[in-house]
Image: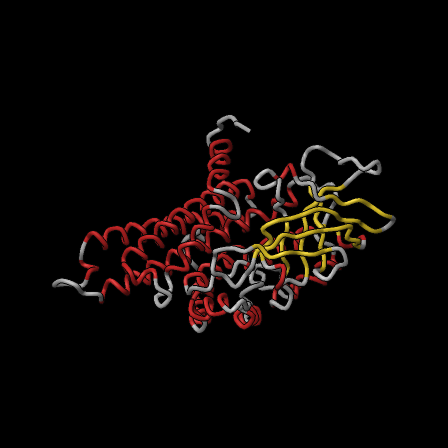
Amino acid sequence: MSSFVETEEQQALRKAVAAMAANYGEKYYLEKARAGEHTTELWSEAGKLGFIGVNLPEEYGGGGAGMYELSLVMEEMSAAGCALLLMVVSPAINGTIISKFGTEDQKKRWIPGIADGSITMAFAITEPDAGSNSHKITTTARRDGGDWILSGQKVYISGVDQAQAVLVVGRTLREDGAHKSESLRPALFVVPTDAPGMSWTKIDMEIVSPENQFQLFLDEVRLPADALVGSEDAAIAQLFAGLNPERIMGAASAVGMGRFAINKATEYVKTRQVWKTPIGAHQGLSHPLAQNHIEIELAKLMMQKAATLYDLGDDGGAAEAANMAKYAAGEASVRAVDQAVQSLGGNGLTKEYGIASVLVASRLARIAPVSREMILNFVAQTSLGLPRSY
């Protein structure tokens, strides 16, 4: 299929997700966030309707479609003011990795629940001293008979309090206690959130979100042999299988947020009248909003390209496009939200109009899941062939 001409099925999915999300909207999302509650009803309904697991294999309860369809779900939910961060994590990263590298038992155990929303799985890679540099990961796993013993710390781990399990990225140790390799050979472990030795503390954020961030502590957590997903020496390909979807979903969330902001602003400036015509007639407002719309549409096009390449199995092409899409969407979304606030004037900073809370949330798109600077490094080195500085 063409990457931007959507099939009837994809158009129908878009319409169905938009209709469901509209029943909740930003008021529901913000009320839940400010009350310290989770969007359980929205997550549950999205799961039952098949939206959360649309990308996962049919034989394990998923929709059998691809990242294109899952990014479409994310975009429409975000455009309705319900950008659920765990959509990026549970089905896109973890569902993909377990589908590709898990054993038959692991697939049967985890994927049906991830697909229907009854199981939420968090993802833990970032560490206090290993942010963008995954080679510095110090969380370790050592064998003890048939078991694994996991120790380390993780930071900025989303939704641990909502999750039944966490997919933890660690490094295996040799029998003498040394790292098996100084190069990054990540080992991935499914850790139930009630596992003895695992604890977490909430990180206070200024983002108004029903999904919280945590520091995670792994203190000699004993896991059975089947907690390991894939090979303990799978090199980096196994980890990256989940990171391209993460970037595509990050772009989808930012594109949706940009659409949400532009929609709020245009609705307002069409009716707000101070002089002879509505303020939307003034180019000082109409031109910036038109520019925002163009930039969001361009970012969306790259997101569609990335998802299409990924679904076709072109991992190299998808990596370049996914990084570019995430960069473009993050930049465009921040500008759109800022312009929306400006368009509403003082009303843009009130709780009533629901835009002010998006100011901080949109800023996240330039930082996570990978910073704009690291994307520029990636493009400079891989697309342009420039030397590394680090």
User: Please, which residue is most extreme toward the right here?
Assistant: 145
Task: Give how far across and how far down residue 327 sits, in percent.
Answer: 44, 44
User: Which quadrant of the figure contains the C terminus?
Assistant: top right
Q: Is residue 277 left or right of residue 46?
A: left
Q: Is residue 361 above or below residue 237?
A: below
Nearest to the observer: residue 34 or residue 180: 34
Task: Specify how the rendered protein is coloured.
Answer: secondary structure
- Could you tell whether 119 is left or right of 75 in the image? right
Q: Residue at x 67, y 47 (%)?
A: 153
Furthest toward the top, the residue is: 387
x then y, percent, for residue 17: 46, 67
Instruction: Give how far across and how far down residue 99 sits, in percent.
Output: 66, 55
Tell me: residue 50, above or below residue 169. below
Give residue 165's quadrant in the image: bottom right
Identify the image quadrant of residue 114: bottom right
* Image coords of residue 210 (percent x, y): 52, 64
Judge left or right: residue 212 versus residue 252. right
Task: Residue at 57%, 68% (x, y): give it.
Answer: 47
